[in-house]
Amino acid sequence: MELARRAIGLIDLTDLADDHSGDQIAELCSRAKAHHTAAVCVWPEHVAQCAILLQGSDVRVATVVNFPTGTEPPDDVLAATRRALADGADDIDVVIPYSALMDGDRGAVSRLVSDVAALIPGHVGLKTILETGTLETPELIAAAAQIAVDSGADFIKTSTGKAGSGASPEAVRVMLEVIAQARDAGKVVGLKPSGGIRDYSDAASYLAQADEAMGSDWATPATFRFGASGLLDALIAIVEGSDYSGDSEQY
């Protein structure tokens, strides 16, 4: 029960479905406030609504750019980032151009992340989505994570939830190694497992990895988030001692 409560406070409660209405976004914000999740994560067009509904709370408003393919023109990504910031976004989750990285173009990743980072004021977090299930190999995942960190990322995030597999313990292990190296160099970088995280055992597993690699007091909302939609219900069931039968995420 204690771990479930801890995990609830680390959730970016996500609604990236293609057809959700303003009423559904309002319900998302209401649930996030009621259960004290770390943030909501929504499409850019919902940022202004969420910022108003969550004003005065501790729940942050996250949104996504260059999402989900990582192939939008850089100028469009920067324009979307500016709009989201103007609308009140607290966190920007940008998909790196992972296909370019797979083709050997590391510069495309560093340029985009650096350019987005240059727009972001200090109170706003920059999360970089690596799409680890598509990168697949530890070497590519490590390269993506390191480039993102070197280019100004505050967090490295596993997945969009829209392509390939989502988070995996293997990918998270590689990412934590990069995060630990960054800490040794004096830089704080967070981790966001995302995609396919649905139940208590998933949450407990990733928190255990973080605790082992970084120390038991490291994973806080400032350094660790879960990107998930269905996880909150599963954890509430643990806290309340009820049954939960959810089996899918609503991206």
Image (cartoon, rainbow, N blue to C red):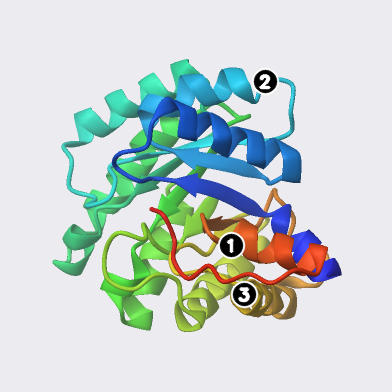
Q: Camera-side residue: 23 or 184? A: 23
Tag 1 residue: 231
Image height of 1 relative to 13, above or below: below
Q: Is residue 167 left or right of residue 140?
A: right
Q: In the picture, residue 181 is in which quadrant?
A: bottom right
What amino acid is at disc 2? Answer: Gln
Q: CA distance from mark 3 to mark 2?
A: 30 Å
Crowd around label 2: few <14 · some 14–19 · many ≥20 (10 Å)? few
Q: Is residue 55 left or right of residue 251?
A: right
What amino acid is at disc 3? Answer: Tyr
Residue 49: % across, % down: 50, 21
Kindly identify the residue that appears in the image at 72 percent across and 60 percent down. 236
Kindly identify the residue that appears in the image at 29 percent across and 45 percent down. 67
Residue 52: % across, % down: 59, 17
Q: In the picture, residue 42 is in which quadrant?
A: top left
Q: Earlier in the sequence, mark 1 or mark 3?
A: 3
Q: Camera-side residue: 196 or 167? A: 196
Crowd around label 3: few <14 · some 14–19 · many ≥20 (10 Å)? many
Residue 234: % across, % down: 64, 66
Does any portion of residue 48 appear in the rendered image? yes
What is the secondary structure assignment of the residue under circle 1?
helix
Total marks in image: 3
Mark drawn on residue 206: 3
Tag 2 residue: 55
Image height of 83 relative to 135, above or below: above
Crowd around label 1: few <14 · some 14–19 · many ≥20 (10 Å)? many
Q: Nearer the viewer, mark 3 or mark 2?
A: 2
Kindly identify the residue that appears in the image at 63 percent across and 59 percent down. 233
Image height of 146 relative to 38, above or below: below
**Quarter of the picture holding the N terminus:** bottom right
What is the secondary structure assignment of the residue under circle 2?
loop
